[in-house]
Amino acid sequence: MFSRKRKAEFIDAKSIPPMMRQIDVAQFAATLRSENAVRRASRAMTARVNQIRDAVLDYVAALERAGKLGDNGEIYAQAHEIRGLAEMVGLVAAGRIANKLCLYIDTCFRRGQTPDKTVVTLHIDAVGRAARATDEATRHGDTVVTQLEALASHKLAAE
Amino acid sequence: MTAAAFDYLKALIVEDNTHMRALLRSLLHALGMKQVYECTDGSQAYKELRERKPDFVLTDLSMKPVDGIEFTRMVRTGTDSPNPYVPIIMITGHTERPRVEAARDAGVTEFLAKPITVQNLLVRIAEIVDRPRPFVRCDNYFGPDRRRHRMEDYPGPWRRHDDFKDDLAIE
């Protein structure tokens, strides 16, 4: 016969110190889910879009500089910033390619390998093109992402 | 309400990217939250947690010197943690899967995927406010229950190979 003998202690949410008075909770949650809240927050986000887009382009320039120096740590750092911000301002392809670059470098580092210079350079070039060529960036980026992913996988499999 | 509730609700943003930090601050201000504190890594955040006593935390994952995972671990299991129960929403991008799993296992309450959208942010905050998660304490974990759906009277069948080993004992 099986009986429950929990090794884990479960602490009910009701016994955890609340962040606000119970009377406010429902109203507060309703406010957060209201169209008005969405509208106000959306306005705040829209107001930041241009600033973030400029920042992404600055990170792209820094990524390209790091690429010329062959500094893989810095390349990862700049690509990481790009992947975090680019998609929020519509630079979907640039964000995705930067993400693939991060994943490739991270995999190499975890394996104790040096990232292949060609793979890294092609990714950096693709990020730059996708970030600056806003027309058809996504379609262009989809192709580039697929090709680069295949190249990176091929290189990783070969090593 | 709601002005009063927003007035006393305190949020802490832990994010090393200036632009993302500013964006999150703007969003929370737009919702009417006035007490929004910011810092750029987990070690600063731990001090802020002690001093400001925020009601919830929005944190990035990758930061230096102390990242979001280590920060979460310190909050949940640190012997001097000022509030091990504080809700922590982790903002993750296209982050490597092992790191996301590590974050979950450190005790993150909710995940918010980048690119963040207004709707997703609001839903996550609403979740921690009106549907607080139960906590679990065991040998190697303290934090929100990682299972989203749990039936107290679940009769089986037990599908996991470790159901009996970890949760049940044979008498």
Image (cartoon, coloured by chain):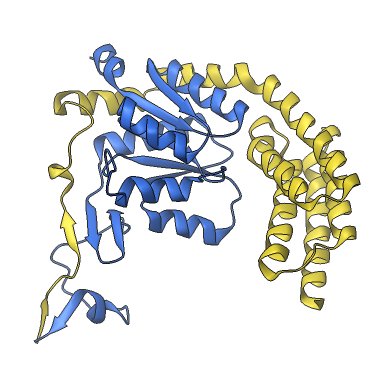
Chain colours: A yellow, B blue
Q: Position of residue A66 (x, y in %)?
A: 83, 43
Q: Residue at x 73, y 60 (%)?
A: A104
Q: Residue furthest top?
A: B3
Viewer-side residue, A139 vs B71: B71
Q: Is residue B108 visible?
A: no
Viewer-side residue, A50 vs B102: B102
Q: Residue at x 20, y 65 (%)?
A: A8
Is residue A110 shown left or right of residue A126? Answer: left
Quadrant for residue A147, please give it: bottom right
Quadrant for residue A63, please give it: top right
Q: Position of residue B161 (x, y in %)?
A: 32, 82
Quadrant that contains the N terminus of chain B? top left
Is residue A54 shown left or right of residue B11? Answer: right
Q: Position of residue B86 (x, y in %)?
A: 29, 39
Viewer-side residue, A44 vs B63: B63
Seen in the picture, residue B24 relative to B143 is either above or below; the reply is above
Q: Position of residue A97 (x, y in %)?
A: 76, 49
